[in-house]
Structure formats: structure tokens, C-alpha cells
């Protein structure tokens, strides 16, 4: 059985709730089962938010992440709030602006996600898509083809090329690090 419990965290407005939906739909395109849940602070924009996705080859019996296998954090506040519950041998992917501690056997990847979206693409609104590219390149939880399909089904019409570039940038950034 293959099962991944994934938490995407950042601040409201970074698009991680949509990112979780896209990741779950990509898993479904791969023929896997997936469930996605979300929560965010009362501030909506600027407050800590999280999207949780469970991907499994078997039936999913509980929709909430209990033992996080993969945690993505784009802000310090989100990391501080949501890093509890990451498995001892889990994968932690943080934006390089986040000060994260490597504990136990956690695999820590510090990646310039926010900087890449802003400076390489000039569009901070695609931060979530860059982050998904990084996550999938590092973890291989779903195929790149299914991720791209899910992205293109969800993004606003007219932004498809920008979002493909954001995915490619995420893959490229992650491929430069030692995985």
C-alpha cells in the first residue's frame, strides 16, 4: 500500500488551498484515491492557512492528516504553527526564508519558492504552482503529467502558459538540490 499524508501551509492568499485541490486532483488522474481538507485563520489573507491532502492506493478511512509524511511551509508563522505532527522520517520542504529545524530523520529541503515566483516569473500569484512543482519533483507522490493536467483544469483561462512556466520552474529549482 502506498499512502501519503501531506500538509501545505503558508499564509492566506498564497493559493495553497487551491494547491491542495490541484494535488488531490492530480492524484485522482493517476488512478489513486485522494481527499483534501483545509483551514485558515480568521484573517483569511495574511493569517496562517493549511491544506491537507491524503493520497493512497487504498481506500481512505479518515479525511484528516494524523501523521504527516510531507510538510510544505512557505512562511515562518505557518511552519511554527503546523510543523507539529511531521513524522520523524518525514519530508520537510520550506521556503528558504523559513528557519526550520532538522530533527530526527526528517529530510529538510530549503528552497527559494517565493523568490522564484516573484523574481524569475514576476508573478507572486503563481507561488502555489511553483511550490507544487518543487513538491512533486522531490517526492514523486504523483506524476508530472497528472499534476500539469490538474493545474490546467483549475487555473483561470489565459494563464495556462504562465502556470506551465511556474511548474517547470518548481521542477528546475528542486532538481538543483540534492534529493
Image (cartoon, grey):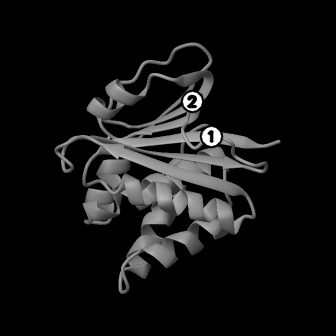
Quarter where residue 155 is shown: bottom left
Cα distance between the residues tagged 1 and 2: 9 Å
Q: Residue at x 60, y 39 (%)?
A: 5
* Picture layout, residue 12 above or below residue 96: below
In the image, taking residue 48 as reference, residue 131 lies left or right, namely: right
Q: Position of residue 103 (x, y in %)?
A: 52, 14
* Picture layout, residue 148 above or below residue 128: below
Closer to viewer: mark 1 or mark 2: 1
Q: Nearer the viewer, residue 62 or 129?
A: 62
Per the image, label 2 sits on a secondary structure element best described as: loop
Q: Residue at x 38, y 75 (%)?
A: 162
Q: Quadrant of the N terminus?
A: top right
In the image, taking residue 21 as reference, residue 16 lies left or right, namely: left
Q: Is residue 18 visible?
A: yes
In the image as oriented, which residue stretches furthest toward the top?
104
In the image as oriented, which residue stretches furthest toward the front?
61
* Picture layout, residue 150 above or below residue 67: below
Which residue is disc 1 drawn over? 62
* Picture layout, residue 155 above or below residue 172: below
Q: Nearer the viewer, residue 133 or 61?
A: 61
Is there a contact, CB below 8 Å, between mark 1 and mark 2?
yes
Q: Is residue 172 visible?
A: no
In the image, taking residue 10 as reference, residue 145 lies left or right, namely: right
Quarter where residue 41 is shown: top left
Per the image, label 1 sits on a secondary structure element best described as: loop
In the image, taking residue 57 as reference, residue 21 lies left or right, namely: left
Q: Position of residue 163 (x, y in %)?
A: 42, 72
In the image as oriented, which residue stretches furthest toward the right?
1
Which residue is disc 2 drawn over? 66
Quarter where residue 179 is shown: top right
Q: Residue at x 34, y 57 (%)?
A: 15
Amino acid at each position: 500500500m502506498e499512502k501519503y499524508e501531506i500538509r501545505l501551509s503558508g499564509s492566506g492568499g498564497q493559493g495553497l488551498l487551491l494547491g491542495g485541490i490541484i494535488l488531490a486532483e492530480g492524484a485522482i488522474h493517476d488512478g489513486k484515491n485522494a481527499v483534501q481538507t483545509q483551514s485558515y485563520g480568521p484573517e483569511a489573507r495574511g493569517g496562517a492557512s493549511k491544506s491537507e491532502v491524503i493520497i493512497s492506493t487504498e481506500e481512505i478511512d479518515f479525511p484528516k492528516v494524523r501523521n504527516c509524511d510531507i510538510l510544505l511551509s512557505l512562511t515562518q508563522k505557518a511552519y511554527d504553527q503546523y510543523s507539529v505532527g511531521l513524522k520523524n522520517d518525514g519530508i520537510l520542504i520550506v521556503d528558504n526564508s523559513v528557519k526550520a529545524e532538522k530533527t530526527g530523520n526528517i529530510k529538510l529541503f530549503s528552497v527559494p519558492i517565493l523568490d522564484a515566483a516573484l523574481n524569475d516569473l514576476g508573478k507572486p500569484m503563481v507561488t502555489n504552482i511553483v511550490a507544487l512543482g518543487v513538491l512533486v519533483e522531490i517526492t514523486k507522490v504523483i506524476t508530472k503529467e497528472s499534476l500539469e493536467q490538474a493545474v490546467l483544469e483549475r487555473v483561470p483561462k489565459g494563464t495556462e502558459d504562465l502556470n506551465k512556466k511556474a511548474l517547470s520552474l518548481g521542477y528546475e529549482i528542486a532538481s538543483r538540490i540534492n534529493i
